[in-house]
Amino acid sequence: MIAFIIGRYFLRPRCLRKIADTPSLQAIDAAVKERGFSTILLLRLLVPLPPAVNYLYGATAATLFNFFAATAIGNAPGTAFVVLAPRGLSLRLPWYGYVGIAIFACFLIFAGSRASAAFRNHLDAQYFV
């Protein structure tokens, strides 16, 4: 959270100059502003990024609430894996565990389609107008 705030107030003003000069960065910044939660959540879930990326999230147009909520939800599966991994392959889930996994997979597909649609719309607006 502190890294996001530092990125917002110290990195963002410097990054805005670079963003203004680069159409692709403008599209990415606009898409993150529009779909910040989905974008950050997908990056948290799909890519193991170093903690320094929190500064970069602060440099984007994402809101603090979207960053916090997406980070809390996106870090939950990795935390659950670290906690449950020592139990090994003998882990047997109750029926509602499998339902939860299925719901999570559907949510991941839905969030991914929304984030990729936002990026595609903004990139099309930048390059094909």
Image: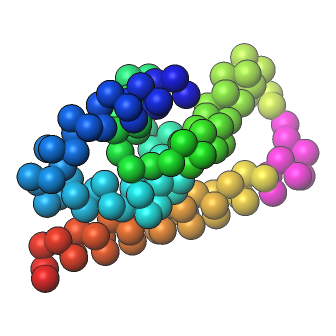
Quadrant in the picture for the C terminus:
bottom left
Between 79 and 123, the one nearer to me in the picture: 123
x then y, percent, for residue 90: 80, 28
Between 25 and 48, the one nearer to me in the picture: 25
x then y, percent, for residue 102: 71, 58
Quadrant in the picture for the N terminus:
top right
Between 20 and 56, the one nearer to me in the picture: 20
x then y, percent, for residue 53: 38, 30
Q: For residue 8, what is the image quadrant?
A: top left
Q: Judge whether 80 appears above or below 94 on screen.
A: above
Q: Main secondary structure of the magenta part?
A: helix
> What residue do we see at 14% from left, 44% from top?
18
x then y, percent, for residue 43: 45, 44
Lateral position of residue 49 relative to residue 108, left or right: left
> What residue do we see at 81% from left, 57% from top?
99
Residue with the most extreme left position: 21
Lateral position of residue 4 relative to residue 123, left or right: right
> What residue do we see at 67% from left, 27% from top?
79
**Segment colored magenta:** 92-99
- Residue 129: say if magenta: no
